Image (cartoon, rainbow, N blue to C red):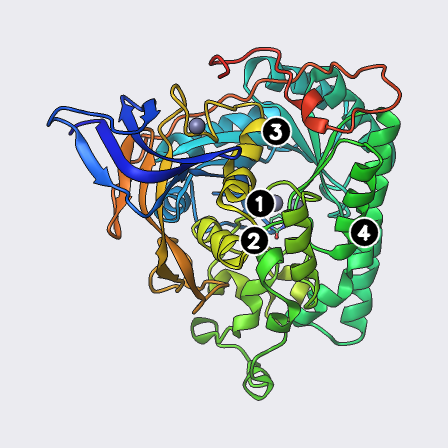
Amino acid sequence: SSSKILIKGGTVVNSHHQEVADVYVEDGLIIAVQPNIKVGDDVIVLDATGKYVMPGGIDPHTHLDMEFMGTQTIDDFFSGQAAALAGGTTMHIDFVIPVDGSLTAGLKLYKQKAQKSCMDYGFHMAITKWDEVVSKEMDLMVKEEGINSFKFFMLYKGSFMINDELLIEGFKKCKSLGALPMVHAENGDAVFEGQKRMIELGITGPEGHALSRPPLLEGEATARAIRLARFVNTPLYVVHVMSIDAMEEVAKARKSGQRVIGEPVVSGLILNDSVLWDPDFSIASKHVPLVICFIFVPSNYQYVMSPPIRAAGHAKALQGALSSGVLQLVGTDHCTFSSTQKAFGIDDFRKIPNGVNGLEERMHLVWDTMVESGQISASDYVRITSTECAKIFNIYPRKGAILPGSDADIIILNPNASFTISAKLHQYRTDTNVYEGVTGKGKVEVTIAGGKIVWKNGELKAFPGSGKYVEMPPFSYVFDGIEKADSNYLSSLQAPVKRSRSST
Ligand code: DUC
Ligand code: ZN
Ligand code: ZN
Ligand code: ZN
């Protein structure tokens, strides 16, 4: 099996520039990008005439093989990544969940889970409690383990939630290490109160999940986290911006020059809360009593995630914020459960395992929604699905670019072909898909990961163990001590302490 590939005649798109050129790949690296490359007959030639040749997608936000809400996500590092490859994503960054608060034990476990990887991956570290031991372990993660981002939970009262005092401590620690703090921003105390209120009202279905935690609680926590980050003078990454309320806080902070990164997720860009109401209430009312092996799970259970899917209008506003640069990159928060697992909460929405799919659909849905619709250019698409993520987490231009010396993670997208999404067609282990029946323009016809063709003509060739761990080095904080922050957050975020590869 040859690892020499020539992609001929396509439009090569980078985040800054596009041109018609050939791309030559050898031993997992991009060797040349120029017109009319001549090669010998030991080289696989792919004709990309009339198609786009782009960096493989990087999903900044996934949860594979995660223990959560009393159960385990159904997609692991192989099934989730195989699906990603079929959809044009060639790298993801997953969240390590500490074991009993221990980062070291958590990382050890996740390294084992990731052994079966079929594409490259990196790790963020979740912080689920705060003390001196955790603080010391963070040094180790940054200096020895290639982790440069830590996520703090402002909710999950009684378990992961940390208060403002500890949030400030965590931000200070990140700053001292050159790591990027991330927040899940919802007000945990208020969410807890909202949930009680819904149960008291007898609203126990998935719609109660959304009603218990309205956008204003996301807006409040986002504003608070942003202000505390400013107080500490550290950049901040807000994961899954799901509402206008949260987005406007990011917009306001960025306008004032603060380095805040806002990440919308595909579900938030596409879906609206009409999906949370039972599609057929008369059938739903017949659910009780339940016979466990014949559970009829209404389709609305699958859409429960946190923060919740919002009312119509939020999605469109988030798309606008993405096209105007208020929000910078698109994740998925991919976190899948079977309908049987979702049924754990059949009598109480608080027990429905939170999470939706997206790893396999992200590249298609973002292309169709943002590019095909005319909201952004192909270069912008590359930026929000790949390049920006590589830059933020300090692995550019190894990832996120079609440049000589970059990793050969490449997709060929045919703008004239269409895609159809269905649980019958997807590569996940889940039996449902929150985008069931969605069709659109722009099909990923070929995916090359680590220099190998892994997806072509609907055929997947993914091998467990072929994916590599990508270390993400910390940043040097050149802005330290400067009162008025640089309005271009990248000028500070892009100054690496070390690089595994030279910059072009
Ligand atoms: N939200 C989800 O929906 N799933 C995983 C974790 C989270 O915050
Ligand atoms: Zn060029
Ligand atoms: Zn979250
Ligand atoms: Zn998440």
Q: Give the image location of residue 322, x and y in percent.
A: 64, 48
Which residue lies at the image location 50% right of the left edge and 25% below the top edge? 108
Q: Mark 3 near mark 2, Cβ–Cβ under 8 Å? A: no
Is residue 428 shown above or below 25?
below
| Sequence-earlier tag: 3 or 4 | 4
- Within 10 Å of the Cα at label 2, are there few (<14), some (14-19), or many (20+) other Cα atoms? many
Which residue lies at the image location 85% right of the left edge and 30% below the top edge? 230
Depth check, front residue: 467 or 489: 489
What's under tag 2, amino acid-wise?
A: Val
Judged from the image, the secondary structure of the residue bearing numbered disc 3 is: helix
Residue behind mark 3 = 392
- Within 10 Å of the Cα at label 1, are there few (<14), some (14-19), or many (20+) other Cα atoms? many
Q: Mark 1 near mark 2, Cβ–Cβ under 8 Å? A: yes
Q: What whole-number distance in Å separates the C-alpha atoms at marks 4 and 1?
A: 19 Å
| Sequence-earlier tag: 1 or 2 | 2
Q: Give the image location of residue 79, x and y in percent.
A: 37, 46
Q: Is mark 3 within 8 Å of ligand 4?
A: no
Residue behind mark 4 = 219
What's under tag 4, amino acid-wise?
A: Gly
Q: Which mark is residue 330?
A: 1
Q: What whole-number distance in Å separates the C-alpha atoms at marks 1 and 2?
A: 7 Å
What's under tag 1, amino acid-wise?
A: Val
- Within 10 Å of the Cα at label 3, are there few (<14), some (14-19), or many (20+) other Cα atoms? many
Q: Residue furthest left?
A: 41
Q: Give the image location of residue 144, x and y in percent.
A: 56, 13
